[in-house]
Amino acid sequence: MLGTPGAGLDEAGLLELFGTPDLLAAIAPLDCIVLLDDTIALTPPVLDVLPPNRVLLAVRADALAADGTARRLAELQMAGYRVLIDGPPPEGVAAPVALRTVARDAGLDLPRAGALPALFGPHLAYHVDDMARYRACETAGFAWFSGDYGLGASVPEGDDGTSRRRMLTMLALLARDADSRELEAQLKQDPALSYHLLKLVNSAAFSVGTQITSFAQAISRLGRRQLQRWLQLLLYARPHPDSPPNLMLPAAALRGAALEALCKRDGGDRDEQDLAFMTGVFSLLDRLFQMPMKEVVQDLNLPEHVEAALLSRAGQLGQRLRLAEAGRPAPETLEEAGVDGADWWQSQLHAYHWAIQVARNV
């Protein structure tokens, strides 16, 4: 979702964002929703770079009060664009009958149950920043959600944390370069972890036509560096094959990939990039385990600067982690972290592309 309600993107901003293929390629196969204050920015040059099959237009309902806006939106819909009316129409103004799909700011008020007809969706709720708002919006008929609701997810029922403790043990083994037989022995103790690892190495992301059926093959196929990386992410995997997905997984993957990309930009070597990735992924472990971060990291023997970043957001790595947490950092925050806007944008494109692929395979 691009844009800010009440301060939508203008023509220049839209041309800059969509003037190269990077954005839509990075989020594929997902589509992009653009928040707009009105239709003024949708000039012919802009529409030339907004493919109707990949871009949805969410236009503020207040714009319907202006002459010609309703007709313009109907024309855009006829041209193949999916149009959402963002917010309730102004008093005395009716939304066009053909425009029944809506967007709503869940931070302003919660919708009533069944308020939206599913027939005309999918409808979008944004600023959904906790699970109570998520459930209320879902009950109302929304199917698309934007916000931090996934970061407040509770530990699934029946999950006592045993699998995750085993994974932390596995990470400690990898950190000290343990023998492959020790890694196999640890994997065999955890059916859920074994399932996810074998599913991963046999997925489209790794498969070259040979079925992997043993842990030894999996370890050999991935290699230690990749195994360590995927185990870090598997901390957030669903505890059982039929459990609902953990909504923290894509957020953890996004943070890890963004910090890694910035480290690579700075000339960091492979080990430094791995540590940057680990810092981003581990930054949500306190929420996952519902315990203080100090208790989470105390037995992992992490490098001092990684531990400082996780515990107090100290050092350059801690500043970069703050950027990843902010999502849309202010210019002064970027400057403090030594990152310019262009580099941050590229790191985000890389991170979103990678996180989407991870979420589809884990």
Image (spheres, rainbow, N blue to C red):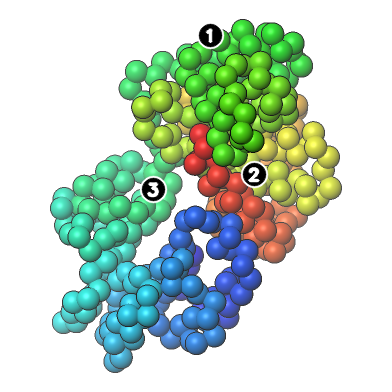
Judged from the image, the secondary structure of the residue bearing numbered disc 3 is: loop
- Foreground residue, 248 or 317? 248
| Label 1 vs 2, first from the N-terminus | 1
Q: Name the residue: 59% across, 71% down.
A: 17
Q: Is residue 237 visible?
A: yes
Q: Residues within 10 Å of mark 2 (few under 14, many from 20)?
A: many
Assign a secondary structure to mark 1: loop
Q: CA distance from mark 3 to mark 1?
A: 36 Å
Give the image location of residue 204, x and y in percent. Answer: 56, 39
Which amino acid lies under the numbered mark 3 shown in the image of this protein? Asp
Q: Residue at the location (36% across, 33% down)?
A: 244
Q: Which residue is mark 2?
A: 257
Between marks 3 and 2 in the image, the one whose residue lies nearer the viewer:
2
The disc, 3 or 1, on the residue closer to the chain's N-terminal end is: 3
Mark 3 or mark 2: name the one nearer the start of the chain: 3
**Residue occupied by mark 1:** 189
Residue depicted at x 63% and y 63%: 22
Q: Amino acid at mark 1?
A: Gln
Callout in the foreground (3, 1): 1
The residue drawn where x is 29% and y is 92% is 67
Q: Is residue 297 above or below residue 206?
A: above
Question: Crowdedness of circle 1 by 10 Å Cα count: few (<14), some, many (20+)?
Answer: few
Indicate the position of residue 300 as horizontal and vertical percent values: 66, 19
Amino acid found under the numbered disc labelled 2: Ala
In the rendered structure, are the residues bearing label 1 and label 2 in contact, judged by CB atoms less than 8 Å apart?
no
Horizontal and vertical percent for residue 153? Answer: 39, 35
The mark tally for this picture is 3
